[in-house]
Structures are given as structure tokens and as C-alpha cells.
Image (cartoon, helix red, strand yellow):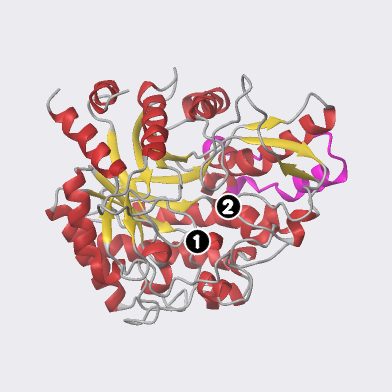
Amino acid sequence: MTPEELAALLPPDFELGVAAAAFQIEGAADEDGRGVSTWDEFVARPGTILDGSDARVATDHYHRFREDVALMADLGVSTYRFSIAWPRIHPDGTGPANPAGIAFYDRLIDELLAAGIRPMATLFHWDTPLPLERRGGWRRRETAERFGEFARTAGEAFGDRVDAWVTVNEACTVTLEGYGLDVHAPGLASELLIPRVARNLLLGHGLAVQALRAVPVAGRIGITNVHTASVPATDSRRDAAYADLFDFLHNRLFADPVLLGRNPAPPRGVGALGTVLGILSRSSRRDLALMSQPLDFYGLNYYFPSRIAAGPPPPGSGNPDGISEAMDSAPFHLTDWPPIDGRPVEQTGFGWPVAPDYLRVVLEDLVERYGERLPPIVITEGGASFPDAVDASGAVDDPRRIDYLTRHIAVAARGVPGADVRGYLVWTILDNFEWAAGYTQRFGLVHVDFDTLVRTPKASFHWLRRVISARRTL
């Protein structure tokens, strides 16, 4: 499909944008009063990051944001989704706002608006202030309350200029990877923490919605969850039961309270674990009402489907996000997809299957489960990592990313009956610090030399610019 053909598929008001997260790109870890986050502490532990790196400099977006906004303006995107670093605004997680932190985001937002780019601000993209984590973090309701205060601070400072707000990004990933499996910050490993952390993250979302509306902010308000299709590896009853458990943990545990205002149905067929998780996941009517306030949009992050097999994984195999003892002892695991028509399933550099058809499946599942309660959808993240390199001519050729984005954006543009899909934001604008993978995975439309910090737009950047340009001539 040519860029012009893809452009012709896009509805008139369909947003095409890019996304990024503060911890992964900003750097300036010790500057201008920024506090320490759980991720700062986590990366300092030996063995937690694949290449032993850290994000103290990252892509130095804190100092180079004007250069990066100029790249976005050249690209022609309508929207930039960024995150506001909680520790840069409230270094201790509470108390008076840090003026230097407010000033940085003032400059960034004004630069975006001057370039004709709509700011979409995410309030929590995983960088919990370390003092709050030391008091229990998302295991405690207090953190949700402090998060509500942070949302009010951000809303009062930026609410007149931000076009859209995302309260919490991927509560699922924070919960499972950070508190259940010890592969992300804060690095805990207890399956019994999962329901409590999930509940407090959703309470934080609800309190943030209330705070933003009380300001009131001018922009739309939503939440972003990562969804996956959970597919049994075989026809066995055990695989089917654990696929249902994974669907519960990854999808329903977070979406049902927000979109339906009710507790998710507990998984069946997995013995005492399912019973305990079901009981611990129950929230009161009052809390459910807080979690399920009406939203202006629902942010969907989609990367790949999950094929689930019962039993622990092969030793040391981990999952796409990392390896841990907790993961090695889990009662189920993600397994590779078998060949289709004799050919291996294409994978990204992270080992994720390239499966745009399953984006359609996820959208159909959302419609089936949530019906009229489903707000308009913005795909707030989608993208792929590949081992990109600058060639002798100074170019970066990444045809596999172009193919990935072409096929996924086409699915989003066509949509499914009952789903009002209003945009697709590419993850990500810049190669960055990719959490536990460090600098080993490159998702960016722009290549970053992590030694010199030189930015080089990739072929996918020029391709997307051509798509956006073609829309303007239709």
C-alpha cells in the first residue's frame, strides 16, 4: 500500500501523531530540582537493565526539546503525546510544586502550540516519586490520593493549553511487571499484590479525573490501557483456562471497573489462584463509582497478541520485557506463534509477533464487552523496534517499520462496527531508553546516536511525512 493509498483510508478528523514518555527521553536527572523516581532507583540495581545503562541523559530531550518539536513539525503530525514527570513537579510526591519543573513543561507546551501541534499530556507514565514508593507506593491508597493532588497541580498549570489528558498509562504493565514479576520498577514479585495495586492505580485515575474536571481543564480526559488478545496455545482445557486468567489480569482487571463500573468476573479453571485473585480484586461500590466516571476518550495501546500455554516457561526464557525468578515460576507463560502456511510469524526486534489482524480482534472484543459504554478510542501507542543503523550515506532504512505501521494504521482507519476510532499515535518519535531493555531496542521514527545524541530521521519518518502530506491534497 502506498502512502497515498493509506492517506485515502483515513477519516477526515483522524489524528496522526507520535508519543513518548518523560523518563525515557528527558534525561537531566539531577537538574532543576527533579526528584528521584522508582525507575531511577531500579536502574541503579545491578542486573536489572539488559545493557547496564541508565536514563540519566537518555536523549537529552530536556535540553533539546525545541529541536525535537521542530522534527515533529517537519513530520507534520497533529498530536504529540508526552508525559509530565511527577518527580519533576513534586520531587517528594507531594507538597508545593517545583517552579523549574512547571517552567519546563510551560516551554514545551508553548513550543508545540507555536508549531501547530496539539499537546496530549500523560500524568503517570510509571515514574512514581521514590519517597512515595518507600511508603508503600501503589500498594497504598495514599499514593492514589497524592496522584490526585499532582493532577490538580498539572491541570492548574497547563489546563488552558493541553488538548487532551491521559491520567494513567498502562496500569496493567506497572502492576504485572513492576509488582508481580520483578522485571520493571519498583521490582517486586508477589502475585497477591496484583489486585491491590491495580485497584489503587484505578483509584488514582478516578481522583485525577475529578481533579482535572474541578480545575476545570479545557482539554479532553481519558485513560490509556494496553490490550492484547489472549489466545490459548492449544485446544487443551488448561491452556484455555490460563488464557482466560491472562485476559483477566491483562485486560478485564483494568477495563471493567473503568468502563462498566463493576468488578471483573474472576477467572475459572485455575484453582485457588483464580479464586483468591477474584476475591482480592473486588472493589466497593463507592470506589467503582470513582473509577468509572465518564471519559471523553479511551486510550488503547496495542502491540501484539499473546499466545498462552499452561505451566512455567522454559528456564530463563522470560517474556518480551525481561527475565526474573518470579516469571520462571509462574503457572503459565507466553509462547511463540507457530508458522502460518509453513512460514515463521514475523517478529519485531523485541520478539513480538507482527499481527495487525489482532488489533481488529482487540477492537471487536472492546465493542462486545463494553458496547455503548465504550468512549471514542484513540490508539495512543503502536509501533515496533528493529535493529536500525545509520548507513554509509547517513541514512537509516527501516522498511519493516514502514510495513508494520502501514498495516496497523490501515486497520485502525478501517475500524470495526461499534468502535469510534479517532486516531493513531506512533510509538515513538525518538529512539529512547526502553525500560528494562535499556538502549538495545529502537522504536523511533528518528534514530538517536546515544553517544553524540545526533538525531537522524529514518525512512519511516519520511514515509509518514508523505502520508500526512498526501492527506492535505485529498
Q: Residue at x 24, y 41 (%)?
A: 462
Disc marking residue 173? 2
Picture coordinates of residue 68 (x, y %)?
24, 59
Picture coordinates of residue 337 (x, y %)?
65, 32
Tell me if residue 252 comes above or below residue 171 in the rendering.
above
Q: Badge 2, how many Cα within 10 Å: few under 14, some, many 20+?
A: some
- The one nearer the camera, 140 or 306, is 306
Disc marking residue 126? 1
Whether residue 272 sits left or right of residue 119 in the image: it is right
Q: Are marks 2 and 1 in contact (CB under 8 Å)?
A: yes
Check if residue 286 falls in the magenta segment.
yes
Q: Residue at x 27, y 44 (%)?
A: 461
Secondary structure state at the residue bearing disc 2: helix
**Residue 394 makes an appearance in the image:** yes
Check if residue 58 falls in the magenta segment.
no
**Residue 266 makes an appearance in the image:** no
User: Which image quadrant: the C terminus?
Assistant: top left
- The one nearer the camera, 305 or 271, is 305
Picture coordinates of residue 435 (x, y %)?
51, 61
Residue interval drawn in magenta: 259-287
* Amino acid type indicated by mark 2: Thr
Tell me if residue 391 comes above or below residue 325 in the rendering.
above
Tell me if residue 409 comes above or below residue 465 in the rendering.
above
Whether residue 102 sits left or right of residue 248 in the image: it is left
Whether residue 201 sits left or right of residue 163 in the image: it is right
Whole-angstrom CA distance, mark 2 to mark 1, is 9 Å
